[in-house]
Amino acid sequence: MDKANEIRREKGFVDVVNLARDFDVEVVSVSRPFENYNAQITYDKGTKKYVMHVNEAHSVERQRFSIAHELGHLALHNKQLAQLGKLERSGASETEREADEFAAQLLMPEQGVRDYLTTVGIDPKCTIDVSVVKRLANQFRVSKQVAIIRLRELGFYVPFIQFA
C-alpha cells in the first residue's frame, strides 16, 4: 500500500481525525450501539463535500481503525465514491479488503512494527504472547484484535489468544 506509506511518511504518527480533516473530510460521531455499524464515508455531489460518520459506541481504538479504513476508500476508491455518493458494502469484497489493508499499513506499518519489536527485545522467530500483543496495541493505539491480525499478516506466529 504505497499510498498509506506515503501519508505516514509525511505525517509521522497518524491522528486519523486530523488526517481526515486535512483531506477536507468532516468527521461526525453517530450513536449506533446496537447495530453492526463501524463507519461510512459519503460524498455529497451538491456541496462537493465528504462526510464520515463514525460509531461513537465503539472504543477509541476501533474508531481509529474505522476512520483509517474509510480514508482507504477515499484514497483508493475515490472515483467510485464521487460517482455513487457512497460505496456499497460487502465484507468480503476486494474494495473492503483493500481499505482494510490501507488502514493496517497506515496505523501499523510493517517496518514500524518490526522496529518496535526489535527495540523491546522480541525475537521475530518466537511465538508472540499476550503481553507483546498488548504492548504493541498500546504503542500503535489499535485494538488487540487489530494487532494480532497485523502480526499474522506480517508472518509472526501468534497462537489463539482470548481477551476478556
Image: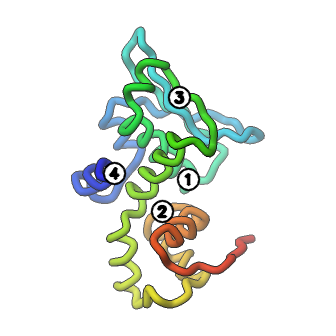
Q: Are marks 4 and 3 in contact (CB under 8 Å)?
A: no
Q: Which residue is mark 3?
A: 87
Spatial CA span between label 3 and label 2: 27 Å
Mark 4 secondary-structure assignment: helix
Q: Secondary structure at mark 2?
A: loop
N-term mark: 4 or 2: 4
Q: Earlier in the sequence, mark 4 or mark 3?
A: 4
Of the residues under marks 1 and 4, which one precedes in the sequence? 4
Distance between mark 4 and mark 2 Cα atoms: 17 Å
- Which labelled disc corresponds to residue 60? 1
Image point 50% across, 40% down: which residue?
Answer: 95
Task: Answer with the quarter of the image where residue 30 lies.
Answer: top right
Q: Residue sitting at 61 percent across and 53 percent down?
A: 59
Residue 121 at x, y percent in the picture: 40, 90
Q: Mark 1 is on which residue type?
A: Val
The mark found on residue 141 in the picture is 2
The vertical placement of 102 against 111, above or below, is above
Q: Secondary structure at mark 3?
A: loop
Determine whether label 2 and label 1 are within 8 Å by CB.
yes
Residue, disc 4: 4
**Whole-number angstrom distance, CA of label 1 to CA of label 4:** 20 Å
